[in-house]
Amino acid sequence: MTPGEMAEVREDLEAFAAEMFGAFTRADQRRWGQAYVRGLLLDGRRKSVEPMAARLGEDGNRQALAHFVTTSPWDPAHVRARLPWRMQDAIAPTALIIDDTGFLKDGDASACVSRQYTGTAGKVTNCQVGVSLHLARDHASAPVDWRLFLPASWDAASAKADPDKVARRTRCGIPADLGHVEKWQLALDMIDETRSWGVHVPLAVADAGYGDAAAFRLGLQQRGLHYVVGISTTLSAHPGEARPFTPAYNGTGRPPVAKYPDKPRSVKELAIAAGPKAAKPVSWREGSRPGRARSGFKRMYSRFVALRIRPAGREVRDATEGAELAECWLLAEWPAKEAEPVQFWLSDLPADTPLTTLVRTAKLRWRIEHDYREMKQALGLAHFEGRTFGGWHHHVTLVSLAHAFCTLRRLNTAPKDTAPA
């Protein structure tokens, strides 16, 4: 925002900040929290403390802003607990979307930084990785919870512990009882936390980094959540019509147990066996290119195969009572010009779910990519220069507030028959 635009919305921003920072008992925390969010919203290439302070005028106290975001002892969970309540009413979310994003780093002094893979760079590189949970529907979304991933090299109890990184834990303010936890478990922890705040959305969406983990899918089911998650081509399954059988007992040894007659196949093999004629055309939303849709933009379109399958694997079998594995949807995108499917999803939505619903839900994940892009390009998500664990969580929480304020303004000013991004 330009200073002029900020002046026009200043009153609304102060009211929003007062609501979000209502848990703060100290006036100075409320003041610097509102100033920090305002600094994130103002135009500028860098959204670290020093350049923001230079743009904030009377609130441009660099030392106070740095103290507030880095070392002030406020609990970000108390702020985040208020955010989903506000955004749930505004968005009416149909799904929780879970993903992670990288924060590239040159040095090794920041909390939880390590050489690890991040989709931000598309490779293994030196970075932090943050896992986030977003409330979403087709026209809007909002990040409402975050976790900074702690690699095994930072965990003294891990066989992969790096002594130098373990020694930096105290300087980085990493809680002594915090150990390495897989990203999918962090996602389940955030779902539990948002539920403790009174936010209940019955569907989760995630990419293959989470969908490939059977424990994640089982965790969602245990919480009563349906899911549509990306999966790798190698995930194994039986066809939906397959049934276990019990071989005849010959009277010696242990009685045979029921099992499937054929070995499971990869989801890619199952989709290819269905053939390209099984692929049906589906249009799921309007894109950003000019077109003939009502909004003036071209609609997103492709071809999809939907099959009923029974996911296999040791974890799935161990969690299944009896011999018969649960039936799920396999969704595969198979564009007309491709020789084989290009993307796969697994879903436990009911068997009568329409193909269009499956596709639109799977493709809803674009909302989280939109959120990351907006937060990084316009709101300084990756500009935090502090090194502490608590400071990182403070910063991403404040960026989420700035993002939510922008989303609320778009929703309030958009025509009723349009769907703002």
Image (spheres, helix red, strand yellow):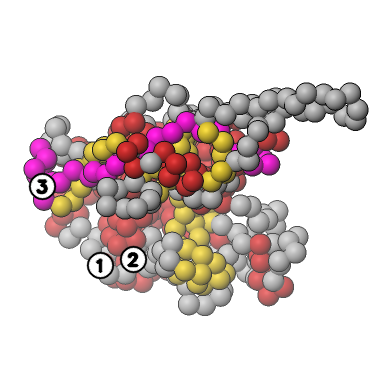
Query: Counting residues from the N terminus, which is met first, the one under dot 1 or under dot 3?
Result: 1
Query: Counting residues from the N terminus, which is met first, the one under dot 3 or under dot 2?
Result: 2
Examine the rendered structure and indicate whether residue 337 appears above or below residue 293. Answer: below
Please name whichever residue, 390 or 315, is drawn nearer the observer in this view of the structure: 315
- Secondary structure category for the residue under label 1: loop
Q: Could you tell me the amino acid type at mark 1?
A: Gly
Q: Seen in the image, is 144 located left or right of residue 263? A: left
Q: Is residue 84 visible to us here?
A: no
Question: What residue range appears in magenta?
Answer: 290-316
Residue 291, numbered circle: 3
Name the residue beneath numbered marker 1: 44
Residue 47, numbered circle: 2
Q: Is residue 57 magenta?
A: no
| Gap between marks 3 and 2 measured at Cα | 36 Å
Instruction: Kindly report which numbered mark, 3 or 2, lies closer to the viewer in this rendering.
Output: 3
Examine the rendered structure and indicate whether residue 128 appears above or below residue 77. Answer: below
Q: Is residue 301 magenta?
A: yes
| Gap between marks 1 and 3 measured at Cα | 33 Å
